[in-house]
Image (spheres, rainbow, N blue to C red):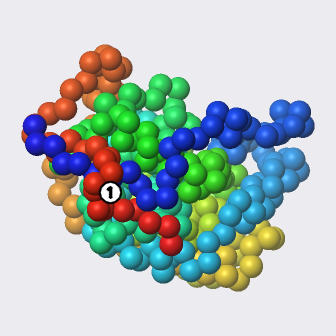
Amino acid sequence: MHKEKHQDMEGFDTSISLASLLCQEDDSFLGQHQNPDEDLDSCSLSESQDEYVQTLLEKETSLESFPDSSERSKRLPKHARLDAINWVLNTRAFFGFHPRTAYLSLTYFDRFLSRRSIDNGKAWAIQLLSVACFSLAAKMEECIAPALSQYQVNEYNFEGNVIQKMELLVLNTLDWKMGPVTPFAYLHYFIAKFCGDTSPKDLVPRANELILAITKEINLMDHRPSVIAAACVLAACDGQLTREAMESKTSVISSWGSLDKEHILYCYNLLQEIEMGRSKTPESLVSSDLLAHHSRSAFLENSSNTSAVGAKRKLTFLDDDQHKISRT
């Protein structure tokens, strides 16, 4: 097995004290809602649910903001980001994980690249970043997170300690803020608001599918999660809405201004284009849901005994490497 050696990340201190990893919350934190993506009850909406969603909307803007983040992220070649997204989505399907896990990992990915750059778009570093982000998201969301050795990459065989170092770099770069609001937190609420009681039963799975689909077309730093959720719910309810009809439906959210509604319209139009493209896709292609169904049991059965397949480049970080991941 051929081995390439790579340097530890520039400016990354691996000697982190245990004390620095302790949470600093006081006792009042225990009474707060811990899971912003917990599904809202799909029955009649109460005033408390309106208040809860308003809290989520406020959290979206208060968690963090990256001015001109999209400009910095454009340094990454579009095909490189698409490759990373495809790996995340395929890996999500392979393990049968919740769509939220994939979305969360892509949020980490885009947030990281808004703060750091990868020299010359190095393929190995981009792939390592996607593995680290997915691993962190799985630990946040899933009951059973895979061992690091179970993440299969086409061209590389990353050692566990390499992935761990990248995980720590991601955690520090994102200031350990790993629980952002995602579009999934809004689905039931928006379905009740936009689609009414006569909405199809498969609307949530359909909206989930659209949320993952749109990640390939937009940088997740450019659109608020509530905007993405609204566009996906509207597209799942009715793919032929006029601008006037959409504005009428979204007017029920009083905190949304004209800019938010423009973003919703933009995302909705993208989803229409995605649907047009899918209509031309051969039916012989296997769906990700089918892949997830067959592979979930394989993961559980082989979780303690997974080996790499094929000849891959085994990556480690040593002091003599010249490739760097730098802070912008």
Q: Which residue is mark 1?
A: 125
Q: Residue 262: which quarter of the image?
A: bottom right
The picture places residue 135, in percent across and down from the top left corner, at 44, 40
Image position of 178 (left or right of 134): right
Mark 1 is surrounded, within 10 Å at the Cα level, by few (under 14), some (14 to 19) or many (20 or more) other residues, namely: some
Figure disc tally? 1
x and y, in percent, of residue 168 in the image: 51, 45
Q: Residue 225, relative to residue 291: is it above or below?
A: below
Secondary structure beneath dot 1 equals: helix
Find residue 275 and report its horizontal and vertical position in percent.
36, 66
Is 206 rendered above or below residue 324? above
Whether residue 133 sits left or right of residue 160 in the image: it is: right
Q: Residue at x 33, y 58 (%)?
A: 126
Q: Position of residue 284 (x, y in %)?
A: 15, 49
Quarter of the image for residue 253 reads bottom right
Residue at image position (48%, 80%) is 71
Residue drawn at the location 26% of the way across and 60% of the way down? 123
Residue located 58% across and 51% down the image = 172
